[in-house]
Structures are given as structure tokens and as C-alpha cells.
Amino acid sequence: MPFTLTGVISIMIKGGRMKSIQILYFLDLAKTLNFTETANRFYISQPAVSKQILALEQELNTKLFERNRKSVALTHAGVLYFDFFSQSKEAFEALQQEVSRFSENKNKTLTISFLMAWNLSAIFPKLVKTYKENFPHINLVLENHTFNTLDDRLSRGDIDLAITLTQKDRLKMEYITQDITTIKSLLFYSKDHPLGDKTALTVQDFKNENFIIYTDQTEQYSRNLIKSILAPYGFVPKTIVVSSVEAMILAVEAGQGVAFFDEWIRYKSNPNLNYMTTQMTRDVKAIWLKKNDSETIRNFVKTFETIVDDIKA
């Protein structure tokens, strides 16, 4: 392999034949300026190093080192060839790494899961197009799940990456997290609500309402969560716990209460619902397992973040 200790692939220069091992000996000797030390580094004899350096000088038709009994020094030509071979070696190794990454990622599948009930129709087309243009060898699989299912599938390694709204107390030590963006919280209420035709509403206007919540944790967890969200507004909410996001929507449509959703929710166009924008925000995060960390995942996260920023701008 070129530029390795065992490399024997030859480089053709001026019709001659120069072995990469000679270049390695030259590069090392140019640093040590000691034939014996270089020989020891390669586990060969000092005469063997001298023989290869001499062959290289003959091939290049120039003297690379000034030698006497007391010292070894690079000639002017030696300095120039040292710079050239050093840069060539670094460039070649970088090329090898790039080819290796491409080979490893060829036909690789990246599975990403988003929160169920999100409407990302303004993001997905541009996201997929941009990512595929830059990384055509990666096959994208997009899924959506509830909080709990998404977390379970990520923990088991069934998905590579989760894009979600996650409470800090739910993050696990084995996860890597990265903030993507901040989105606003919306308060939904029935179109037939007594306040349905009012404007300039505040969260306090709904303090006597039931707040519909659903849980994929424990019921008490969800009740405590909504209480903490509404604490800055100066009241303790009455709550009704349901089993799913769809059940929340049905309850709000039926006038049984009001509910918080984020601005990416797909129900904003529901003709039976009104909503108001609040001052509260939620952090959208990218989450993946530390043991699965890869450039492939990070490239997707960076692309997603860029697309979201462009749309918000």
C-alpha cells in the first residue's frame, strides 16, 4: 500500500522506477539526520538505508544529503523534495481516507424518525433533495412515531437518528443531542368556543378550561409537566389525560378543553379549531446513540438544520 511501511507500489518518474519505501526512508532521514536512527525505526540495517537513499538520489539525478563522518544535512534539492514528498504523502493519505469513507457509506441506509403529527411538508422536499445531491450514496428512510415509540426504537438501534421535542429529564447518558431550532407553542381551542371570535387572547383567558394532555410516561408525569408550563401564567390548570395526540384533537374539537401543540403540528388547518400563538417555545433536538455516532448522521443533522434556518429566514 502506498506510503505505508509495507508499501512497495512504484511511482513512475521520468521513465524510472522509484519505490515508495525509498520515499519513506528519505522523509524519516530528513527529520532524524541520522542513518542509524532511521534504520532502527524501520528495523533494518544502516547499510540498507544508505543503499535505498543512494538509489533514490540516482533516480532523481540529484544529491539529497551532504554527508561526512560527523554529520548529515539536507541539500537545497533535498529540502525541496522533502516538502514535495511530505505534501504528496499527506494529500494521498487524505484521498485514501475519502475513498475509504465513500466505500463504507456506499449504499448505506440512514433511518430517521420524526415526531408523529408533525407537518414537515415545507421541509422534506428540499431536505431530501439537498442531502441526496451532496450524499447520493446514502439511502434515506423517513419514519414518524410517538415520543415513547421513537425513544424505544432509538434505544434498540432500530433507527439511526431521532428528530424530536425532548424534555431534559428524558435524555439518556448514551445519547448525543444537538439543538436544531426553536419553535413556538400554540394553544388550540374549538372554533365554537365562547372565545372563538375574540382576538388578542392570552393564555390566562383560558385558566378555567380543562387542559387536554396525553401521556406516554405516567399520568402524574404529564400533569406535573403541564403545571410547570403554566406556572408562569399564575394558575394551576385542570387537566384531562387522554391516550394519544389524535384523542387530544378530538377532545378539543368536542369542546371538552384546550390543548398545547407546537407550531409544526399538522392540525393548524383543521376547520374546527382555532389557535393562538404563545410566548412559550420548544427546542427541536437531533438525538442519536453515542455508539452509532458517524459522519453520515452528523451530515444529515447539519443539512436539516441549514434547511430549517433557510425556511425560517
Image (cartoon, helix red, strand yellow):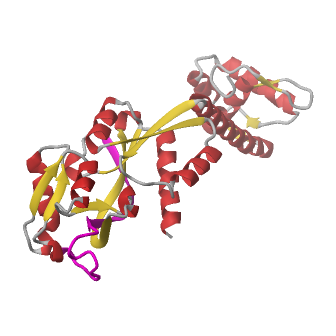
| 56 over 297 or under it: above or below | above
In the figure, is residue 234 to the left or right of 107?
left
**Closer to us: 222 or 256:** 256
Residue at 13 percent across and 67 percent down: it is 209
Q: Residue at x 42, y 36 (%)?
A: 160
Residue at image point 32% right, 63% down: 272
Viewer-proximal residue among 30 and 296: 296
Q: Is residue 307 above or below residue 196?
A: above
Residue 212: x and y in percent read: 18, 57
Residue situated furthest right in the rendering? 15
| Residue drawn at (28%, 35%) of the image | 152
Q: Which x, y percent locates residue 218?
A: 12, 44
Give how far across and how far down residue 195 sits, in percent: 22, 76
Residue 174 showing in the rendered view = no
Quadrant for residue 173, please give it.
top left
Q: Is residue 189 magenta?
A: yes
Which segment is the magenta one? 174-203
Instruction: Tell me if 277 is positioned left or right of 304 in this view.
Output: left
Residue 269 coordinates in the image, percent (x, y)? 40, 62
Residue 208 lies in magenta, yes or no? no
| Viewer can see residue 125 | yes
Establish if 108 lies above or below 260. Answer: above
Instruction: Count the marks.
Output: 0
